[in-house]
Image (tube, coloured by chain):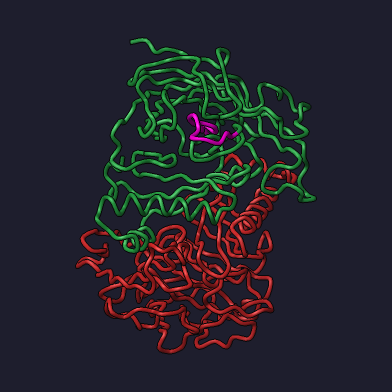
Chain colours: A green, B red
Amino acid sequence: MSRRTVSHEEGAIYEFTPGLEGIATVEPGAELTIETRDSLDGAVQSESDVIEAVPEEVNAATGPIEVEGAEPGDVLAVEIEEIRLAEEHGRVITIDGFGLLDGYDEIDAPWTKLTPVGDDRTSVRFDDLEVPVDPVIGTIGVATAGESYTTLVPHDHGGNLDTTDVTGGNTIYFPVFQPGAMLAMGDCKAAMADGEMCGTGSEIDTEIDVTLEVIDDPASPLERPLIETPDAWKTVASAETLEEACERANMDAIELLAAEHGFDPTEAYAFSSLVGGLEISQVVDPLVTVRNTVPKSYLSSPI
Amino acid sequence: MSRRTVSHEEGAIYEFTPGLEGIATVEPGAELTIETRDSLDGAVQSESDVIEAVPEEVNAATGPIEVEGAEPGDVLAVEIEEIRLAEEHGRVITIDGFGLLDGYDEIDAPWTKLTPVGDDRTSVRFDDLEVPVDPVIGTIGVATAGESYTTLVPHDHGGNLDTTDVTGGNTIYFPVFQPGAMLAMGDCKAAMADGEMCGTGSEIDTEIDVTLEVIDDPASPLERPLIETPDAWKTVASAETLEEACERANMDAIELLAAEHGFDPTEAYAFSSLVGGLEISQVVDPLVTVRNTVPKSYLSSPI
């Protein structure tokens, strides 16, 4: 069966809202290739191209893709099969007013470095250093419940999660807030550190192979994104501070552990303090993002 | 050669100060077995033993151990060969006023669960669940530069770092602030999640095999602890907020990357945003702790 392609040239959004309209409609089970443009819309093609301030429109997310039959209360599963680089270089940049060390005297902003893609596309170069390609979808989400969020912001609908586990081989699950779910994604990186400290990874155009499924009777209602890796389940939460995001991600993990093992909340809290744990996704966006990992040996199929 | 044993019964401290006096003196290269008691000094032996408030004395650290020839400006390397459990059960507890979810209605405090050690000592039990033993030295450090810190607090001297990478097979490096370094350690866990959310792991008595070395002409001056794993170097920083700790750990990683590759700070910052990244150690102590991981492929021998 040939995959259907949905390209950013057909449509891309800069804001997740409750009232998104699809540019493509697919059935549950659809296998798609989604083409994304880099987070800066191609504005940085040489090291003299610098970005003076965070653009009003950034992190273009290809879509929205309407999934037939997805209804509020359902869960949308996005199985990410593969992310392929689709241009010859990525770019890592600093922007004045943005990034973990924004305002430090030692750090120049704006500033740009190109990261050329190696011949076999398994590495990018940073000066003389080779960095293995380990792609990340930075921005991915669905139509929101009520508020609207630009594609710079992560929240319960997903959005700018900048989470390294949103990569090939993993599945990300979203609560469906609106009919059709209205999935969109973009802002990919060839490689990114946990934290995304300078505010970007190696930003790059990609092609993403995904399979979409709708879970219409989830075992647990999902309030926020949840990631499945081969070995673990990871709750994902965004908030004003890392501490608040930790609390939320931990509470979500506690609920899943309690449901599976019949723990009361205190038992689940104590158990969560023994295995897996809290991980930093990103510390640079308007809300920051944390995940709480629980090994699959302790959580079978939480949704 | 037989290892010398240093036991908590010979001496243990509850505060890291500039003026610590050794209970044992060893030469560089010394191979030691250090016996530690659990963080609660044995006060919790059944599930009816609960801890009402954080004790004034907690996290007893066996030592101090004076290392001959260690002088301010040197680096003390503590190679951790193995951590063995030395009692039949650990305990995971909540304490009112302590922990990530302290004050949440759903969470009971004080509360205690015993975690019995399995017959082959490779797992502990939490109710019916088996948790693999993956020991952590919670509190480890040296005499301080000026301020004093109780063993509840992590800072530049080490202390209550509660960092899962402080485990067998890894080496932790400390700046030497006082003659003899004055190493002490305790507060071990049979297992702990990154974050240590409820405020403890599975707290337990242990025997720790270590080898101590003094590096008297470090390539980079060390201001804070640094961890070496088989695959990575990890800067470790503690601060009032996770955000501040992230900044400090990232700045330290940037300095190491700049020294190795001749990067300017901005290049090192951007490169640090592509590989490894920020990790949460603990979110519950009076200062919180974060590490910045850099794969060894990009940092050979930074100190």
Corner quadrant of residue B84: bottom left
Residue shown at the point (59%, 53%) measured from the top left? A241
Q: Which residues are magenta?
A: A132-149
Above or below, B43 against A18 in this view is below
Q: Is residue A141 magenta?
A: yes
Above or below, A262 against B113 in this view is above
Corner quadrant of residue B237: bottom right
The quadrant in which the N terminus of chain A is found is top left
Q: Is residue A65 magenta?
A: no
Q: Is residue B127 left or right of residue A278?
A: left
Corner quadrant of residue A53: top right
In the image, residue B87 lies at what x, y percent? 28, 76
Foreground residue among B153 and A225: A225
Q: Is residue B35 visible?
A: no
Foreground residue among A164 and A66: A66
Q: Is residue B294 left or right of residue A65?
A: right
Residue shown at the point (53%, 34%) measured from the top left? A159
Residue shown at the point (69%, 63%) measured from the top left? B221
Q: Is residue A164 left or right of residue B52?
A: right
The quadrant in which the C terminus of chain A is found is top left
In the image, residue B203 lies at what x, y percent? 37, 72
In the image, residue B246 lies at what x, y percent? 61, 54
Could you tell me how many numbered marks the image carries?
Answer: 0
Foreground residue among A8 and A174: A174
Above or below, B34 against A92 in this view is below
Q: Residue furthest top?
A: A2
